[in-house]
Every structure is written in structure tokens, then in C-alpha cells.
Image (cartoon, rainbow, N blue to C red):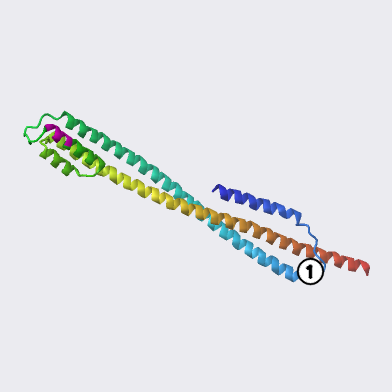
Amino acid sequence: MWALVMVGGVAVLGLLGLAVVMERPGEPGEDPERLAAEAAELTEHAAAAQADAQRAAAVAAEAGAGRAAAQRARDEAWDAQERAEQAFESAFREVAEGRRAAPPALVEAGGDPESRREVSRAALSAYRRGDISVRELREVWRLTGDHDPAQEEREWTADRLQRESMAARREYDRAVAQLRRADQAARVAEVAAEALLTEAAQSAAEAQIAQDAVAAAARGRRGRSRTRRAGR
């Protein structure tokens, strides 16, 4: 909206510049009716241009408000995503700590214990990356003899929070896309309003010049008429 304010300043400067031509004397032989018709046409065009500029300014203001709302929504979505990710990270740490603190399995799954731990750690890393689901993670741990009801509850919580984190991320991405569209719309509206405000200022200046020419021609006619009466 600062651009619109600047253009408004340009319009004011343009109108102030009319003072240079307001006292222009009427040219001898100018057709008063033609001058009046031109002035009326230019005045009508200036009024239409002003109305267009006002509508464009209103559209630009509305688009700017939409952009501000989209920015707030983006910021809120970012905060929500941050909270969801932090909650998941905390839950995941509890899963990892619970796995490390788990007592030896009551059911011997067979095979080398170190190999089973490597498989469990690899499955945990895959789950952390989102490559496998919590059900698949628990199945790996079941096969390696690492089943624990309390740990299972922690895994369920982590799985739920991971889904919420992913949903928050998608919501943030949508908010970013919406802000991008709102910003583009606001920029287009501001450019259009700036152009129409400039045109309105120029039209107003041209109309004022034409009106001054009509007034100058009228003064010239009155002056010539007085001269002729005085010479009789």
C-alpha cells in the first residue's frame, strides 16, 4: 500500500503543476464551443478514471488484507508444526530409551543376541525415517524377542504423534502455498491500482487545463467585446 500512497503524492504534484497553466490566455480565433466540448469530454473521462482508481485501490486494500491473513495463517501453521514435531521427538526419545532400558526378553528368540539388537536398532531407525509403520516395528521386535507391553504403549503414542506431525507439516505446506497465491494477487492488485491512480491524476490535470482554456477564452471574448464597445 505504500506504492499507492506514493502515487497519490504524484497526483497531488500533478495538480499543483496546473498553477503554471491556469492563467494561460485564450488564443484568438479558438472555437469556444469546441473548447467547451473538449473540456466536458475530458472532465467526464477524469471522473471515470477517478472512479476506476478508487475501485482498484479498494481491491488492492482487500488483497493486502488477504495477504496479511494468509501470513498469520502461515505463522500459526508453522507454530503448530513445531509443537507437533517436538511432541513426536519427545515420544520417540521415550521409545528409544524404553527399548534401551528394557529387561532381557522372557522368550528367547534364538540367534545371536547382538544380531537381534542390531535388527531392532535398524528397525527403530527405519521407523524414525518413516520407512516402516509402528506395526511393522513391533513385529520386528516381536520376532527378535523384544516385546514389552509398556513399550508397546509408548510406541502407539509415538506413532500417533508422528501422524499428527505429518498432518501439521501438510497443513503448513498448504498455508505456504496459500500465502504465495495471496501475495501474488496483492502485488497484481497494487500494480493495477498504481497505474489507474496515475491515469486518474493525468486525466484530472488534462481536464483542468481544458477547463482553464474555456475560462480563458471566455475572458478573451469579454475583453474584446469591451474593446469594441469602447471604440464606438
Helix, strand or loop under label 1: loop
Q: Which residues are magenta?
A: 113-118
Percent coordinates x, y for residue 218 in the rendering:
79, 65
Name the one closer to the observer, 36 or 169: 169
User: Is residue 116 highlighted in magenta?
Assistant: yes
Q: Is residue 7 left or right of residue 117?
A: right
Q: Position of residue 52 (x, y in %)?
A: 56, 60
Residue at 26% x, 38% y is: 88
Instruction: Say if 158 sits above or below 170 in the image.
Output: above
Q: Amino acid at mark 1?
A: Glu
Residue 5 sits above or below residue 103 on the image: below
Depth order, front residue of 163/43: 163
Q: Main secondary structure of the magenta part?
A: helix
Location of mark 1 (residue): 30
**Figure disc tally:** 1
Residue pictured at 20% horizontal, 38% vertical: 122
Residue 188 x, y percent position in the rendering: 50, 55
- Residue 221 picture quarter: bottom right
Report the quarter where the C terminus lies: bottom right
Residue 62 visible in the snapshot: no
Q: Residue at x 26, y 43 (%)?
A: 164
Residue at point 43% right, 50% down? 180
Residue with the most extreme left position: 107
Q: Is residue 100 visible?
A: yes
Magenta stretch encompasses residue 47: no
Residue 105 in the image: state x and y as whole percent: 9, 32
Q: Relative to the observer, which residue lies in front, 26 or 197? A: 197
Taking the image as shown, residue 198 lies to the left or right of residue 171, namely: right
Q: Is residue 175 above or below residue 152?
A: below
Dot 1 alpha-carbon crowd within 10 angstroms: few under 14, some 14 to 19, many 20 or more: few
Q: Quadrant of residue 34?
A: bottom right
